[in-house]
Amino acid sequence: MTSNHHKIKPSHPEESDSPDSSTPLTRDTTVPLSSEDSALATEETAELPPEDPRDVVLAQLTKEVEEKNQQLQEMTNRYHRALADYDNLNKRMTVKIQSARMDGIADFIKKFLAVIDTFESALRQMEESKIDKKVMDGFQMLFFQFYDTLEKEGLKAIPAKGVKFDPNCHEAVARGSQDGIDDEIVLTEYEKGYMFKDRVLRPTKVVINAK
């Protein structure tokens, strides 16, 4: 008699929703954004408004104005430098012209020194000759008018007798010796010297004391 024995097959566990033990578990660390952070992120990622063309034009014009102002300042500086150079040149030219004019006048007046010498020598001789007084007075008047005209232009005689020898306007032609007079004092005026304004036309030739 055979008995029916049912073989019991090993039951396989049914698949479950639980994760496979061989798969590592991961933990979700994402932190949800707050409402404020979410709003800020939205603003940052929002599309920027288009640039106003008027602002672009204004910026360009401002830049051009600054460049023009800089150029104007440079031109102004160059103008002032040029004006200063012209003013200095004009002053130098004025001094040179004035100096050349004085040189010309001095050379012209210097030619009359010999005439003055002749007049003074003639007057001395007329005094010694006891010439007629009317003739003498007329000759003196002529000389004085002539000399006065030259004096008004700047001619003047160089003082000599009794003053200390000055090599700038005196020329020593001899030495003498006199008691009671200091050394290098002019004893005698040999030929009168003259100046025109501040320049010596002819030094006075003198004899000076030498101890």
Image (cartoon, grey):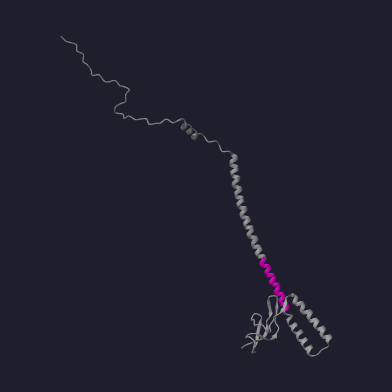
Compared across the picture, whether 32 is left or right of 91 comes to left
Q: Give the dominant element type of the magenta stretch: helix, strand or loop.
A: helix
Seen as rendered, the residue at the extreme front is 180
- The quarter of the displayed image where residue 106 is located: bottom right
Q: Residue at x 79, y 88 (%)?
A: 127
Taking 81 as reference, is 159 above or below it? Answer: below
Q: Which residue is drawn at 64% across and 60% down?
A: 82
Q: Does the magenta stretch include residue 59?
A: no
Taking 204 as reference, is 88 above or below it? Answer: above
Compared across the picture, whether 81 is left or right of 146 comes to left
Q: Position of residue 104 (x, y in %)?
A: 71, 74
Taking 198 as reference, is 32 above or below it? Answer: above
Compared across the picture, whether 31 is left or right of 65 comes to left
Q: Where is residue 88 in the image (x, y as percent from the top left)?
A: 65, 64
- The quarter of the displayed image where residue 155 is located: bottom right
Q: Which of 71 and 132 is in front in this view?
A: 132
Seen as rendered, the residue at the extreme left is 1
Magenta stretch, residue numbers: 91-109
Compared across the picture, whether 8 is left or right of 15 comes to left
Q: Which residue is drawn at 64% across and 62% down?
A: 85
Q: Which residue is drawn at 62% across and 57% down?
A: 77
Q: Position of residue 62 (x, y in %)?
A: 60, 46
